[in-house]
Amino acid sequence: MAGLYTSLRHSPSSSHHSFTSRLLFLLLLLPLTLAVFAFVLQWRGGLNDPTTLWSLDNKKFPGMGSSPPKNLARSSNSDCSQILGRSSSPSFPYFRDWKFNYDSDLKPKICITTSTSAGLEQILPWIFYHKVIGVTTFFLFVEGKAASPTVSKILESIPGVKVIYRTRELEEQQAKSRIWNEHWLSSFFYKPCNYELFVKQTLNMEMAIVMARDAGMDWIIHLDTDELLHPAGAREYSLTQLLLDVPGNVDMVIFPNYESSVERDDIKEPFSEVSMFKKNYDHLPRDTYFAMYKESTRGNPNYFLTYGNGKSAARIQDHLRPNGAHRWHNYIKAPKEIKLEEAAVLHYTYTKFSDLTSRRDRCGCKPAKDDVKRCFMLEFDRAAFIIASTATEEEMLSWYRERVVWTDKALSMKLLRKGILTHINAPMAIVQGLRESGVFSSVIVSAQTTLSKDKFLLSVESTNSSITIGSKSIFSRKIGGDMESQATARKVLEIVDTASHAAAIPPLSPPLMDDLHIDT
C-alpha cells in the first residue's frame, strides 16, 4: 500500500496539478509586487505622475526663466508686492516667472504705444495681459507717477518695454516736429486738460511710429492704460492671429470700443473685478440700439459715459502718421481700413470711485459749465468734473452710484437679454491668473538689475536726437530753418490729396437719439 501511495503521488497528473498551482500563485503575486514597488517609488518621489509632465516644474515653455524668486513677501518692495501679490493657489501655473521673451517667434510683430501717468497697479497688468495675447513691444511715454524712479525702474526692466520720459529736451524736439507745422491738429493746440493730453498723445504717436519701424514692427496700436484689446473672432484668443488674418492690402484695423459697466462702488482692481460691458453701436442691430437708448443711458448725456469711436491698429509703412489718439492716417494716400465685427477695445472708464477726484486733481479748470468746455471734449467728463469740484464726499458717492454703478439688477438683466450688455470673462481670468502666479511680484523683485534712470535718460536723448525717416529727421522742420527744404515740403503738401490732411479725429460720442432717421 505504501508503494502504491508513493506511485500515485508522483504520477504525471499530480505533478501537472502542482505546477499549475504554483504558476497561478506567481501570476497573482507578480502584479501585487509591482503595485507595492510602484507605490514605494511614488511615495519617495521617484516616479513622475503623467499628469505633471507639462507642469512648470518639469517643462519650460519658450521664454521661461529660472525658478521664482524666494520670499517675495519679504522683498524691499513689499507695498507693490501686496498690491500685485500672488495667491497660494495659482490658477494659471504656466505664467509663473514667464519672462515673455518670445518676440522673435511671433508674426506679425505688434507694438503698443501709450502716454501714461498711472502707477504699477494699473500698468503691469495692462502690459502682461497684452503680452499674453501677442504684443511684443511697448513704447511708454511716461510722466507723473509712471515716471517716478521706483515705478520707471521696474518698467525699464521688462523685456520689450521702452520707457520715454517727458523731459524738456523731448518737448523741445516735439515742438519742431512736422505736426506743429501743419494745420490738421492745430485746433487742439494751446488748450488745457483733455485737449493738452490729446496733443501729447498725438506727438508721442508720431515718435512711436519711427521707433516701431526701427524695431521691425508690423503693426502699431495706440491704447490708454485703462483699455484692453479683446481679440474675439480669431481662431484663438490671440491678437497675433487676428492681425495675421487681415488681408495684405488693408492699412488700418478699427476696434470698436465696449465700455465697462461696474456693478459695485468699491472696485479696486478693474481688470480683475469687472466683467460686464456695454456693447458698441457698431456691434448692435440699429433698431435694438435706438429702442433701448433711454434705458441704456440712465439719465447720462450719452449712451456711453465717454468716447464711442474705438481705437485702431495701423500697418507700419511709408508716410504713416497719427490722426489723433483714435486713428492713424497717411500723408500720401487715404488708408484702406476695415472695422472688426467681433473684436473690441474694452474701456475701463470710471470703474473706481476715486476716478472722479483723480480727474479733478489733474485739471485746473473752474467748475463752471462754460469753463469746462475748454477742458473736456465729452459731456460726461464735464459733469463729473463739476461734481467732483463742488460736491461733498457723500454727494459724490450718491452721484457716482446713480450715474455709473449698475445697481438696478432687473435693468441689467433686461439689457443683457437684449444684447446691449455682455459679460466678457477672458481678460479678467488672464489678469487674475497672472497675479496669482506671481508674475507681477517677480517683475518687481527682479527690477534691481535694471538701468538707472539717469543712464536711461542719456540713452533717450541720444535716441530722440537720431530718430530719422530716410536721411531727414522728423524733428527738423521748424520756422526759420532751411527755407529751401520747407518750400519743397509745402509743394508736396499742395499736390497731395486734401483728404489725407483732414482734421484730427477726437474722441467722439456714440450716435444720439437725434441721429435716428426713419426711412419713408
Image (cartoon, rainbow, N blue to C red):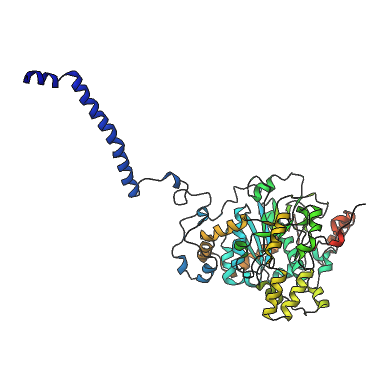
Residue lying at the far front of the rendered structure:
1
| Quadrant of residue 365 within the rendered picture | bottom right
Of 116 and 466, nearer the camera is 116
* Residue 444 screen position, x and y as percent: 53, 65
Residue lying at the far left of the rendered structure:
2
* Residue 353 screen position, x and y as percent: 66, 72
Is 439 left, or right, of 133 in this rendering?
A: left
| Quadrant of residue 178 within the rendered picture | bottom right
Of 309 and 353, nearer the camera is 353
Of 155 and 451, nearer the camera is 155
Res 411 seen here: yes
Res 479 seen here: no
* Residue 261 screen position, x and y as percent: 69, 63
- The residue lying at 85 percent from left, 64 percent from top is 183
Of 105 and 260, nearer the camera is 260
The quadrant of the picture occupied by the N terminus is top left
